[in-house]
Amino acid sequence: MISTGFILLLFGFLFLILGLVQCISSKKFLGYLLGLEIIINAANLNLAAWIELSPIRTDIEPMILMIIGFAAIETVAALSIFSWASRQLRLLGSPLSI
């Protein structure tokens, strides 16, 4: 039977590849931001897999929670910048999209 840590590593690798593809193929800011969020979540899955596969138990759960918090802060900051920039472009009458 396959261990839980190995399954988490496989999903982390899958999410890393999906996030990289999203970042490379995206032409808009929100798509790029979504790719970064997927990559950060892949890192969290890899940390959880490391906890599961490690023979010596470590207390890395607070680090995972800290990374999730940083991802949330990054999302809020990027979305506020996005909304401000789109409002400024709308006021200028620019046809550009972000």
Image (cartoon, helix red, strand yellow):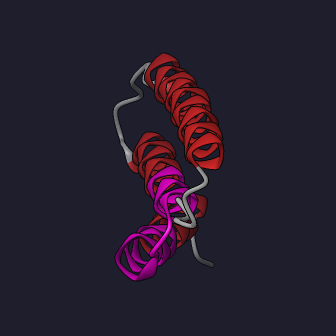
Picture layout, residue 98 above or below residue 44: below
Which sits in the foreground, 8 or 40? 40
Q: Is residue 88 left or right of residue 60?
A: right
Q: Residue at x 53, y 39 (%)?
A: 85
Q: Is residue 28 left or right of residue 20?
A: right
User: Where residue 44 sits: x, y (%)?
Assistant: 49, 44
Would you say the magenta stretch is mainly helix, strand or loop? Answer: helix
Q: Answer whether residue 24 is magenta in the image.
A: yes
Q: Answer whether residue 10 is magenta in the image.
A: no
Q: Is residue 18 left or right of residue 55?
A: right
User: Where residue 66 sits: x, y (%)?
Assistant: 49, 20
Location of residue 34 (image quadrant)? bottom right
**Region of the chain picked out in magenta, as a range:** 14-38
Q: Residue at x 45, y 39 (%)?
A: 51
Q: Residue at x 56, y 64 (%)?
A: 97
Picture layout, residue 13 above or below residue 78: below
Which sits in the foreground, 20 or 68? 20
User: Where residue 89 sits: x, y (%)?
Assistant: 56, 47
User: Where residue 12 sits: x, y (%)?
Assistant: 48, 64
Which of the image's four quarters has the N terminus? bottom right
Q: Residue at x 42, y 68 (%)?
A: 16
Which sits in the foreground, 49 or 57? 49
Q: How many marks?
A: 0
